[in-house]
Every structure is written in C-alpha cells, then in structure tokens.
Image (cartoon, rainbow, N blue to C red):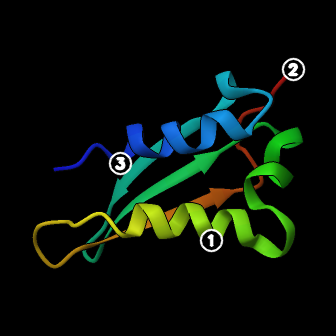
Amino acid sequence: MTDFKALILAIVSPLVEHPEDLVITPVETERFYEYRLAVHPDDVGRVIGKQGRVAQAIRTIVYSVRVQGNKRVRLIIDDRPTKTLE
C-alpha cells in the first residue's frame, strides 16, 4: 500500500513554518483509511488557504492515489491540535 503519511508530509512540510510540529495520525475505519493532520496553530491558515483552496488541492492529490480494495482515503486537517505547543 502507498505510504500516505510520507506523501502528506512531502506536500505539507514546505508550506509550514513549523514542520517539526506536523503530526499525522492514521486511523482505519470500516470504510476509510483516515489520516488526521495536526499542525502548529500558526500554520493552520497556510495549510487551509483562502477559502480552503490549499486544503482542497492537498486532498485532491492524496485522494488521486489508487487504493486496493473498496476503502477510500480521507484527510482530516485538525485545526485544534490536542497537544499544547510551546
């Protein structure tokens, strides 16, 4: 299977000022392979972009990769990271 975590990191890392704070958490459900992306609070706007255009472009690239079976890939950008960043 494709390494979606590496793909997402390769796309998002150049966009943010704090690439060391990128956290990608894979979660597998019955219908989806979900990847939850958490970024530094200062970088949320850079990843989402105006009117969500950057986020949509990232999702388009990630969703275009073929997955075997009938599950689909889903990218969730978490704008409220669970850990506190100092």
Q: Is residue 41 left or right of residue 54?
A: right
Residue underneath mark 2: 86
Identify which amino acid the numbered label 3 is placed on.
Answer: Phe
Q: Is residue 17 above or below residue 36?
A: above
- Would you call the spot at circle 2 few (<14 residues within 10 Å), some (14-19), or many (20 or more)? few
Total numbered badges shown on the rendered structure: 3
Q: Earlier in the sequence, mark 3 or mark 2?
A: 3
Q: Quadrant of residue 19?
A: top right
Residue type at the position of mark 2: Glu
Residue denoted by label 1: 56
Instruction: Give the x, y percent position of residue 48.
Output: 76, 61
Camera-side residue of 45 and 24: 45
Numbered disc 3: secondary structure: helix
Looking at the rendered structure, the secondary structure element under dot 1 is helix
* Residue 4 marker: 3
Pick whichever of labels 2 and 1 is earlier in the sequence.
1
Which percent across, then down, holds residue 37? 58, 49
Q: Position of residue 81 (x, y in %)?
A: 73, 45
Residue at 75% across, 36% down: 16
Q: Earlier in the sequence, mark 3 or mark 1?
A: 3
